Structures are given as C-alpha cells and as structure tokens.
Amino acid sequence: MLFRGTETHTRSVLKAVSWRTLGTLDTFAISWFMTGRVEIAGSIAGLEVVTKIAWYYLHERVWSAISWGHR
C-alpha cells in the first residue's frame, strides 16, 4: 500500500517514538502500582512499547493519506 500524506516517514516515526516514551512511562507506573513489582511492570512496559509504536506509525500513515478534514 502506498501512502501519500503530508508527513515524511521519519517525522511519523519520531512522533511515534516520543509519544510512546510518555505512554510507556505511564504504563510502567500504573503496572508497578497495580502489581507492586518492578520486574512485572518492566515486562509489561517493554512489550507494549514495541506493539504500540508499530500501531501508531500505521495509524498516522493511514490518516495522512485520507484527504477528509484537510483544508
């Protein structure tokens, strides 16, 4: 599938990484609070950072290819 959005792939990747850094810190803190164990919180945060960066990147690329809502 070819995407023709207004953002470069590099910009989309950097936005995804910066957003996931914040999200992963949040997930880690919540997991630690809920389980009381740093090891489990780290495992949860480590797994979700990988999956959510990929989903965010794809989400951004798809939305950048949709002309609806652009002026």
Image (tube, rainbow, N blue to C red):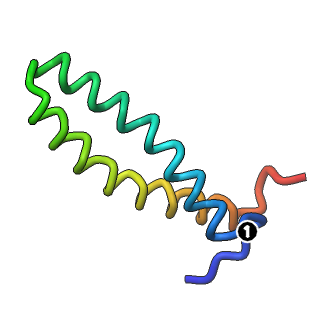
Residue occupying the point 58% across, 56% down: 14
**Residue 68: x %, y % from top left:** 76, 56
Question: Tag 1's secondary structure?
Answer: loop
Q: Amino acid at mark 1?
A: Gly
Q: Quadrant of residue 24?
A: top left
- What residue is drawn where x is 59% and y is 51%? 15
In front here: 59 or 26? 26
Identify whether 34 is placed above or below 5: above
Residue 67 or residue 46, whichever sits in front:
46
Q: Tag count in the figure?
A: 1
Measured from the top left, where is residue 13 in percent x and y?
55, 61
Q: Quadrant of the N terminus?
A: bottom right
52 lies left or right of 40: right
Residue 50: name its quadrant: bottom left
Q: Residue furthest bottom?
A: 1
Q: Is residue 34 above or below residue 7?
A: above
Q: Residue furthest front?
A: 38
In the drawing, does residue 68 fall left or right of residue 18?
A: right
Say above or below: 31 vs 51: above
Q: Residue at x 51, y 60 (%)?
A: 57
The residue shown at (64%, 58%) is 63
Image position of 9 (left or right of 6)? left
The x and y percentages for residue 62 are 59, 64
- Bin the neighbour count of mark 1 within 10 Å (Cα to Cα): few under 14, some 14-19, many 20 and up: some
Residue under circle 1?
5
Counting from the top left corner in percent of width and height, residue 43 is at 15, 43
39 with respect to 26 (left or right): left
